[in-house]
Amino acid sequence: EAGVAQSPRYKIIEKRQSVAFWCNPISGHATLYWYQQILGQGPKLLIQFQNNGVVDDSQLPKDRFSAERLKGVDSTLKIQPAKLEDSAVYLCASSLEASGFYNEQFFGPGTRLTVL
Amino acid sequence: DAKTTQPNSMESNEEEPVHLPCNHSTISGTDYIHWYRQLPSQGPEYVIHGLTSNVNNRMASLAIAEDRKSSTLILHRATLRDAAVYYCTVDSNYQLIWGAGTKLIIKP
């Protein structure tokens, strides 16, 4: 079974530039998550999709971050414009579904973003 | 939302058991406890989960306190490949609440 795919693996940009990350979840997984992980911290949920609808985006800085999941499969996360504090690893995860008693999430390798 | 508290780091000798503690004193009655681990330069991977009873799988065991305010992840025989950051998370309203994790160092 193929895992969660993310690209690019690394990205270096200057502040005020734009950047986009791509995620392809495990086939058949209805729920997709984007996390931000700052060095030395645990992952912080940015947005959660159920199929192509948003379940929770309460921690997404909507003035600069946007995300979409067209057709309920692939997803993109965009930052425009980037700030120095956006330097982090951006993790994508997927799970079969968000509801129910069991919610194992499968993570991709992440995209390491450096903002100079 | 439930929060988790873990030691920043722990050390253990190779081939010895490891007990990783976690406090989650604000957990709700229906919140599951999940443990994930993150190897260097990789995304987190699932280790084990439970609600009230102790759980075992091929990777580890999970011991949950009777009042559910704490839990312990047990690696029965640590190897160098178990060196990672271990996260205790609470599944609250179908979202995982992550703490800062425990960095496990294995000494050969």
Image (cartoon, rainbow, N blue to C red):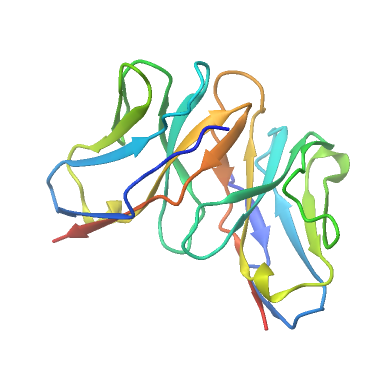
Q: Relative to A110, is B81 on the left or the right?
A: left
Quadrant in the picture for the C terminus of chain A? bottom right
Q: Residue at 87%, 40% (x, y): give it.
A: A71
One can see residue A69 in this view: yes
In the foreground, A23 or B21: B21
One can see residue A1 in this view: no
Q: Residue at 77%, 72% (x, y): give it.
A: A82
Pinpoint residue B29: horizontal percent, then vertical percent: 49, 16
Instruction: Determine whether A34 is above or below A37 in the image.
Output: above
Instruction: Determine whether A97 is above or below A107 in the image.
Output: above
Instruction: Determine whether A15 is above or below A105 in the image.
Output: below
Q: Relative to A82, is A10 on the left or the right?
A: left
Pinpoint residue A99: horizontal percent, then vertical percent: 66, 22
Q: Relative to A16, is B46 on the left or the right?
A: left
Q: Residue at 68%, 44% (x, y): give it.
A: A33
Q: Residue furthest front?
A: B26
Q: Residue at 17%, 42% (x, y): give it.
A: B77
In the foreground, B27 or A115: B27
Pinpoint residue A105: horizontal percent, then vertical percent: 56, 38
Pinpoint residue A4: horizontal percent, then vertical percent: 62, 48
Q: Quadrant of residue A17?
A: bottom right
Quadrant in the picture for the N terminus of chain A? top right
Q: Relative to B7, is A106 on the left or the right?
A: right
Q: Quadrant of residue A21?
A: bottom right
